[in-house]
Amino acid sequence: MENQSFNPMQPDRLAKAPRCLARTRSGKECQSPAVKGKRRCRMHGGTNPGAPKGNRNARKHGGFSAGSKAALAYLKAIAKIVRNCDL
């Protein structure tokens, strides 16, 4: 907590709170205290819990699912065999 400055108007518990790890537009570290239990302040997304676990609404398509990756690998292997075959 080396980036804290002495401010008599700031409560002691707020002064000792962990700082936000986000970078500002100037490239410096954010000086705001992080939200309790989070690594970011309220302005940098600390209050946003994010998408729920297993969020089906965020799924767009199955293009990168395990099944489609396995099918693509299978087709690539067949194409390689056909290319190397002497006909």
Image (spheres, helix red, strand yellow):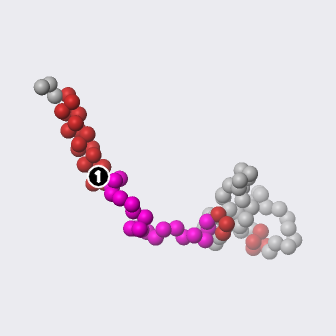
Q: Which residue is at the far top?
A: 86
Residue 41 among those drawn in magenta:
no
Residue at x 22% of width, y 36% of height: 79
Q: Which residue is at the far right?
A: 8
Return the residue nearer the eye: 2 or 34. Answer: 34
Residue 54 lies left or right of residue 78; in this view the side is right
Looking at the image, residue 50 lies above or below residue 64: below
Q: Which residues are magenta?
A: 45-65
Whether residue 37 appears in this view of the structure is no
Residue at x 46% of width, y 70% of height: 52
- x, y percentage for residue 82? 18, 33
Residue at x 27% of width, y 46% of height: 72
Whether residue 63 appears in this view of the structure is yes
- x, y percentage for residue 42? 66, 69
Return the residue nearer the eye: 60 or 6. Answer: 60
Looking at the image, residue 29 lies above or below residue 79: below
- State the predominant SS element of the stretch in magenta: loop
Point out the image quarter for the N terminus.
bottom right
Badge 1: few (under 14), some or many (20 or more) residues near its Cα, within 10 Å? few
Q: Amino acid at mark 1?
A: Ser
| Residue behind mark 1 | 68
- x, y percentage for residue 67? 27, 54
Return the residue nearer the eye: 17 or 56. Answer: 56
